[in-house]
Image: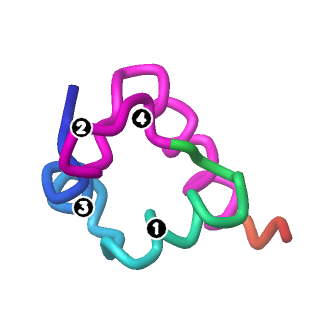
Amino acid sequence: MKSISQVTRLTGISIRTLQYYDEIGLLKPSELTASGYRLYNDEALQTLQQILFFKELDFP
């Protein structure tokens, strides 16, 4: 599991973007800690990779 800050370092997208993706239901975190921190597993990271790929191709 990777924290939201680890994901942002890996992908170069902002924490706010990941929060927005969660808000609109595009990419939900795999797990929330007791403190409310978002955690992402490998499957979520693969989904994020697809989102970024389609974003790069200017898909809406």
- Left or right placement of residue 35 versus residue 12 in this view: left
Q: Nearer the viewer, mark 4 or mark 2?
A: 2
Among numbered discs 2 and 1, the one appearing first in the sequence:
1
Q: Quadrant of the C terminus?
A: bottom right
Q: Quadrant of residue 1?
A: top left
Q: Earlier in the sequence, mark 4 or mark 1?
A: 1
Between the residue at mark 3 and the residue at mark 1, the CA separation in whole angstroms equals 11 Å
Depth-wise, is mark 2 or mark 1 nearer the camera?
Answer: 2
Q: Position of residue 8 (x, y in %)?
A: 24, 61
Q: Which mark is residue 19?
A: 1
The magenta-colored residue range is 29-56
* Residue 8 image label: 3
Does 52 sit above or below residue 23? above
Q: Is tag 4's residue or tag 3's residue first in the polypeptide sequence?
A: 3
Mark 2 or 3, closer to the camera: 2
Question: In whole angstroms, how far apart are the C-alphas of marks 2 and 1?
Answer: 15 Å
Q: CA distance from mark 4 to mark 2?
A: 18 Å
Q: Which mark is residue 33?
A: 2
Q: x and y percent of residue 54 in the render?
A: 70, 55
